[in-house]
Image: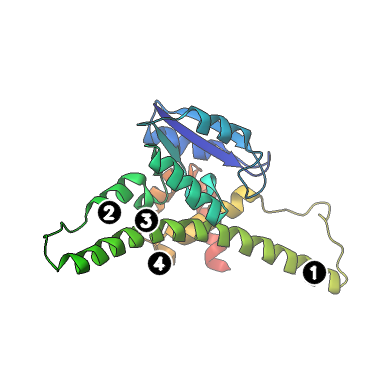
Amino acid sequence: MIYGYARISTAKQDIDRQIRNIMVQEPSAKIYQEVFTGTKRTGRKELEKLLDRVGVGDTIIFDSVSRMSRNAEEGFKMYKDLYDNGVNLVFINEPYINTSVYREATKATVPMTGTDVDVILRGVNEYLITLAEQQIRIAFEQAQKERDDLSERTKQGLETARRKGKKLGRIPGTRVETKKAETCKKKIYKLSKAFGGSNTDKDIILMLGIDKNTYYKYKKELLCH
């Protein structure tokens, strides 16, 4: 059975893009989705339902590693537990840590020779497996870092505003950038060739699931920043 899991932090965010990406990957995927704020697994009822249901040979597709967990230690443990139980994991934005890749890495070990050289070969094999696991850890650590950095920047911005005597809150008639716009801009900045990435405008528009005019507006704002 193939499942998909999508999560947003607030009801104001758009979950449709994650679902579209999952359905492009696997049209028959059964989707579990929820709105949940926080980094911990506790309280994520739909995720718990999904984890209770999956078994050996099943697959879970995530739009990105951050949808699975933004807590590095918990995310890595969840990954290993699911892997050890025979569940396949697919991360659309981080395919290099799919369980299929990790499985190949653990198989790509050097066979023993039955000689004294095996002492060295065991060390090489342990290194290869550790290297593969480190890649997975780094992906979860990056997801946690992005969240922590955003939270810290928000706190610093609010504190700076208070010290300058600025009134906090939205001024009537002003435009506030939505979470969706902020997320899209981050993806554009990361993926676009204009900013050192490897993807064309057309590719990114399809990946983000936004219209052409909105995409070029976001890109222009990034270029002018």
Q: Nearer the viewer, residue 201 or 160?
A: 160
Apparent side of residue 120 relative to residue 133 in the rendered image (left or right): left
Q: CA distance from mark 2 to mark 1?
A: 47 Å
Helix, strand or loop at mark 1: helix
Q: Nearer the viewer, residue 148 or 17?
A: 148
Q: Measured from the top left, where is residue 15 in percent x and y?
A: 57, 38
- Residue 200 figure quarter: bottom left
Determine the image quadrant of residue 125.
Answer: bottom left
Between 95 and 117, the one nearer to me in the picture? 117
Q: Mark 2 Cα within 10 Å, few/some/many (few <14, many 20+)?
A: some
Observer-side mark, 3 or 2, equals: 2
Q: Does dot 3 land on a helix, a strand or a loop?
A: loop
N-terminal label among 3 and 2 = 2
Mark 1 or mark 3, earlier in chain: 1
Q: Amino acid at mark 1?
A: Glu
**In the image, what residue occupies the spot 68% across and 65% down?**
152
**For residue 143, above or below residue 85:** below
Q: Which residue is mark 2?
A: 105
Mark nearer the N terminus (1 vs 4) = 1
Q: Which residue is mark 1?
A: 159
Amino acid type, callout 4? Gly
Front label number (2 vs 4): 2
Would you name the residue on which mark 4 appears?
Answer: 196
* Mark 1 surroundings: few (<14), some (14-19) or many (≥20) residues within 10 A: few
- From the image, state whether disc 1 or disc 3 is nearer to you: 1
